[in-house]
Image (spheres, coloured by chain):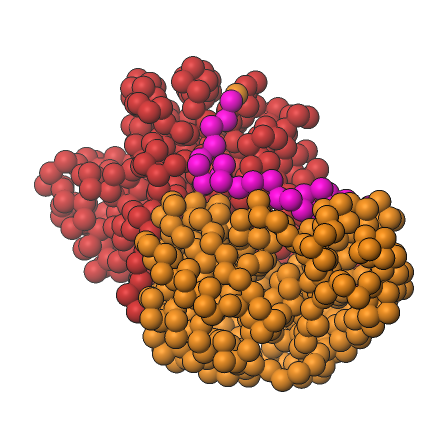
Chain colours: A orange, B red
């Protein structure tokens, strides 16, 4: 049978990163191309203990249908946890638990965007969410990035597009793919500009707890008095990604709409995962868990930074993240980035070409993304050495 | 802020069942309005044992990111399990694990339908999936039901609609809400008609294993040589609904497209649930588990049928399901169904008005849905007695 797919589905182009991601199973590769949290940070003993406890004492509470908005004790614990970072969850806000935070972006685009509507995004940004937005028929328009976050002049320019963009997608902490953190001043300015133009902000904060240097900056959501921010936070990096637990926070009208389409999508998220998450937040020392994350991520980042400083040609630029999992490397203008990434792969080092993260993937790009949380220390040292030699070959 | 929702979201009307469903938390009600599997059928001991085993021996296999298509050993076991019912999963088919089977309908509508496209459905049908389809911007057109399934003449009439409908949604076994099973002849005829008009069939089989009388009828998927059937089966009723595990089966082109949008929706389903499911399918006596389901569901159905026969006014008609969880009760034309359902609720018996299950919820309806799997035997007897008295009050 000849299948006739929808326009919004046909709107999805094969990712320029497809060839690289297809190689992820190859065990001989040094994979700077991943995006996985460091598995040595997972609280395995606690998860096992709590799982046993709940299945022994209250099995039906995890085996019967649950509520679409999520397991209420988890929502209460998540509220306390998010509010460690500022006034993120207010008393008149609504929260729902989702199956990972990508579901928040997908459902938001579904309830807000008609086909052809404009959505703004930091450019580059996380390709998974960019494709979620595209899959709902919206058109992405990128806003330039600077070292301290989004370019405000370019943002105002794009906010003036008619019809007005429906929302903007931002990752203020240790952005994927750049590792850049948006400054407090810019967060406030982004909030004011979006308020002025009546544009919703989807603030995605998957990496916020992974800060290993510098000072925390409060989320945009913490100064939202108008209900323009939908805040998305995930437990994938704090606890473990396989459990698929995230939360969306915002005003009841918009989170209620998200809940409605989440119900029509998967009814509710797996209850077992939510109970595990709740038990960890309620009873474990989260300061100690975050300290452990900082040590693991900070150490690997430092090694990657030190090795790049030693090995890379001076004309190669790269970001210096204060947290998260990614570094964004930019080659000089005269180097063919795709050729460089291709030769790195031939030398058994996998990188993700930056093009994959662009709002318009047909635009030129001199950058690639590297992940430092997944590879071993040995692989980081070995891989950067190989890349360093390549930079000297290419940057003449 | 004034939120400006998308047309497809605004396409969702408040459910006519909303008032009833809002009362579900009331413990004083006899709830014939639910749709929950009988929790005494859940294999709790096995789930606890397998959970402990996997978290102790291979914790990372459930805590790291998993594959979008699902945990491969589960897909293999599910293939064997589905093929107990016929040639359902063929060697050139593709399977994916989804977070409940509602996700299959939601993703299928997303990849196949443009806004305004027509989707056919048995009329009445499961309101959750009808709303999933509506939430993707499609328009539903209902096809009449008869005692042995869909009305073939009406189906061919509706298949001729221009532009041609994108797919048809059917639940051939113990349909929700009617409890009707589609005969083998009709399954073959539906397949031939849809093939003739080039229309995909979404065959939803959540209740297939819950047969307590009569002879099994093979799924439409088992005679699909053209790849027009997408088969959806869930483990919610065989194992437990809170784990959220279902599978979609079909030709790689269409299941691959489903996988792509599932990735953009929730990346992958919770791995823990998939491992539990795999362990149960691979190591437990599924015949014994299904025998247990049959006994529980069959006994409750028999009591409800016996009590209706004793207590209902003879002018009230109701279906006699051979499996599943639902009975469809139709009042005589001169009775106001909504008033009847309202008075039942005042008398502490919750029913779901049939209107909620219609493709066009503004159409008149004389029927309501009753569930027999959730209420206790005592509640079934007590509730049917109350309804019986009401039928004599209303049917004069």
Front-most of B164 and A135?
A135
- Name which residue lies at 51% across and 68% down: A151
- Work out whether B379 lies above or below A20: below
Q: Is residue A46 left or right of residue B382?
A: right
Q: Is residue A15 magenta?
A: yes
Based on the displayed image, in which of its 4 quarters is residue A205 positioned?
bottom right
- Name which residue lies at 60% across and 77% down: A281
Percent coordinates x, y for residue A206 in the rendering: 59, 67
Quadrant of image for the N terminus of chain B: bottom left
Percent coordinates x, y for residue A327 in the rendering: 71, 65
Front-most of B2 and B285?
B2
Percent coordinates x, y for residue A147 in the rendering: 61, 71
Percent coordinates x, y for residue A185 in the rendering: 50, 80
Query: From which residue to which does the magenta span run?
Result: A2-26
Q: Number of marks in the image?
A: 0
Front-most of B17 and B39?
B17
Q: Is residue A37 visible?
A: no
Based on the displayed image, in which of its 4 quarters is residue A372 positioned?
bottom right
Most common SS among magenta residues: loop
- Work out whether B219 lies above or below B60: above
Quadrant of image for the C terminus of chain B: top left
């Amino acid at each position: 049978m000849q299948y006739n797919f929808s326009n919004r589905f046909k709107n999805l182009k094969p990712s320029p990163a497809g060839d690289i991601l297809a190689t992820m199973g190859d065990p001989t590769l040094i994979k700077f191309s991943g995006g996985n949290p460091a598995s040595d940070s997972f609280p395995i003993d606690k998860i096992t203990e709590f799982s046993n406890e709940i299945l022994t004492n209250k099995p039906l509470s995890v085996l019967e249908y649950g509520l679409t908005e999520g397991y209420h004790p988890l929502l209460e614990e998540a509220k306390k946890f998010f509010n460690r970072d500022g006034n993120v969850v207010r008393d008149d806000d609504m929260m729902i638990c989702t199956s990972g935070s990508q579901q928040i972006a997908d459902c938001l685009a579904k309830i807000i965007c008609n086909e052809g509507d404009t959505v703004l995004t930091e450019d580059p940004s996380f390709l998974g969410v960019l494709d979620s937005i595209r899959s709902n028929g919206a058109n992405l328009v990128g806003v330039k990035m600077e070292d301290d976050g989004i370019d405000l002049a370019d943002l105002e320019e794009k906010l003036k597009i008619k019809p007005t963009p429906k929302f903007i997608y931002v990752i203020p902490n240790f952005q994927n793919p750049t590792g850049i953190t948006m400054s407090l001043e810019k967060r406030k300015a982004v909030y004011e500009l979006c308020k002025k133009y009546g544009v919703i902000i989807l603030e995605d904060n998957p990496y916020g707890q992974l800060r290993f240097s510098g000072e925390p900056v409060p989320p945009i959501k913490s100064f939202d008095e108008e209900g323009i921010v939908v805040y998305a936070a995930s437990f994938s990096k704090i606890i473990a990604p396989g459990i698929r637990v995230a939360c969306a926070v915002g005003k009841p009208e918009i989170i209620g709409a998200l809940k409605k389409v989440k119900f029509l999508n998967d009814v509710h998220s797996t209850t077992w995962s939510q109970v595990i998450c709740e038990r960890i937040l309620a009873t474990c020392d989260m300061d100690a868990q975050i300290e452990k994350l900082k040590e693991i991520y900070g150490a690997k980042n430092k090694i990657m930074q030190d090795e790049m400083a030693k090995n890379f040609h001076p004309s190669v630029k790269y970001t210096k993240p204060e947290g998260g999992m990614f570094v964004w490397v930019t080659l000089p203008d005269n180097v063919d980035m795709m050729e460089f990434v291709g030769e790195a792969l031939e030398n058994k080092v996998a990188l993700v070409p930056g093009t994959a993260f662009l709002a318009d993937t047909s635009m030129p790009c001199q950058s690639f993304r590297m992940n430092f949380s997944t590879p071993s220390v040995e692989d980081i040292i070995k891989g950067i050495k190989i890349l360093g030699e390549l930079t000297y070959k290419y940057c003449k």
